[in-house]
Amino acid sequence: MSDVSLETIVSLCKRRGFIYQGSEIYGGLAGTWDYGPLGIQLKRNISNLWWKTFVEDRDDMYGMDAAILMNQKVWQTSGHVSGFNDPLFECDNCKNRFRADHLVEAWVEKHPSEVEKIEHPAYNQSAATLNDYKNLFKMACPNCGKAELSDVRQFNMMFKTHVGAIHDVTSVSYLRPETAQGMFVNFKNVVDSFYPDIPFGMAQIGKAFRNEIAPRDFIFRVRELEQMEIEVFVQPDTWRDQFDTWLELQKQFLLALGLPEERIHQVEIGPDDRAHYSKHSVDTEFDFPFGQKELLGCAYRTDYDLSKHQAASGKNLEYRPKDGGASYIPHVIEPTFGLDRSVLAVISSAYTEDEVNGEKRTYLKLPAHLAPVKVAVSPLLKNKPELVAKAREVYTVLKKEFGAVMWDDNGNIGKRYRRQDEIGTPYCVTIDFDTIEGDTKDTVTVRNRDTTKQERVSIDNLISTLTF
């Protein structure tokens, strides 16, 4: 578990314009969050790095942006209409509903000695295990305190909607709960357009929607989320090597985000907890402020999806090898990345406290390539026109070069430094009187966020001095 509390992260994110509660002026809407100016830039920096790493820098990956709304037959065929469920406890007394696995997890954490009495060797999400825990230990409702929880029921998490003016069974559609199906139904299109060699992949960044029973932990478990997903199409007998390769690539990407390796854990998922389409799954978990939880997933989907869609649609989704070998339906390795969870992991691992001149300082030790603001430019005094004019010149040059440059003349220079530290800005450039006169003319002060050290740099060498 991280040393920083989730409350501290939430407070910083709101105060500094990273993330706000959705619909806040109307009391909010549970499970929805809005990214502010700094949050969306950090989010884009992460997704841009992902796209460059897994799409632009490879010659075996094809990008996609499939529609959110799809023909209802897609979700019927994929098994989501019948199988995309979460276990639910309902209190017979107060009628509140709870995610059954979350309730049991919380109970196990509080009563570790009691777990030894259960017959099951390990906790899993099967209905039988959840009911056993609930019944054997007479678990109470968190809301009213009564031990009147129902047995597990299944709750389908897809948001249902209708397409067109007439609402009947033919107009039903769903807000997609995953981006993967958009790639599976376009498999034939990509093969017909590009005829790639196997193995090859399809990649997509996009919104997904899940009607969570109990959204929680800030942007970790939400009803509207963003995924970065890859479907790698492989020969059936090569799946294991491909799986291991992509599992390692996932870890290397997390390290590129600046996440500490000791807080990254790869956990194999047992048969009772795997998704209905998966034959083998490994989750990459991270030490968040609220505990070790899933950050990434890697699943071996076999030929489940393509076979199902071929049978239901009547379209041939087999791959014909270029060497004239027999056609076959490829198997699939699916590395999936949660973008919102990645943002939370980056912020919580970057949060740092130290002392400067005897005073507590808070700063985000973000990797420079992810920082939403690369450089802050300030005139030492905003009421001195000559300083402001020169600072504007420097700001314009840096803005053109780096883009994510902030003008900051609010408050004294010490307060500006603290504010920029808290949003993770790697460098602050200050234009003072030494910039416009004397032997140090045309030099500026450059302050490093991590060390707080300052040095004089000539304006001509400023761009080459600032490394990202």
Image (cartoon, helix red, strand yellow):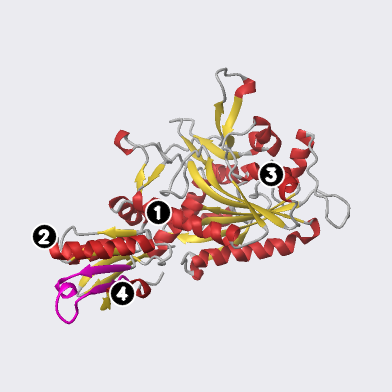
Q: Secondary structure at mark 4?
A: helix
Quick one: label 2, few (<14), some, or many (20+) residues within 10 Å?
few
Q: Left or right: 282 with respect to 241? A: left
Q: Left or right: 307 with respect to 120? A: right
Quick one: label 3, few (<14), some, or many (20+) residues within 10 Å?
some
Q: Secondary structure at mark 1?
A: helix
Q: Give the percent coordinates (x, y) of residue 295.
A: 52, 56
Q: Give the percent coordinates (x, y) of residue 442.
A: 22, 74
Looking at the image, is 448 positioned above or below residue 146?
A: below
* Mark 3 or mark 2, earlier in chain: 3
- Magenta residue span: 427-450
Looking at the image, is 383 positioned above or below residue 456?
A: above
Say which of marks 2 and 4 sits in front. Answer: 4
Residue 394 location, quadrant: bottom left
Residue 32 visible (yes or no)? yes
Q: Give the percent coordinates (x, y) of residue 357.
A: 20, 75
The residue that disc 4 covers is 460
Going by the numbered disc 2, the residue's amino acid type is Asn
| Rendered-image quadrant of the C terminus | bottom left
Residue 370 location, quadrant: bottom left
* Mark 3 or mark 1, earlier in chain: 1
Q: Residue at x 79, y 34 (%)?
A: 314
The verdict on residue 444 being magenta is yes
Q: Residue at x 55, y 56 (%)?
A: 51
Say which of marks 3 and 4 sits in front. Answer: 4
Residue 112 visible (yes or no)? no
Q: Are marks 3 and 2 in contact (CB under 8 Å)?
A: no
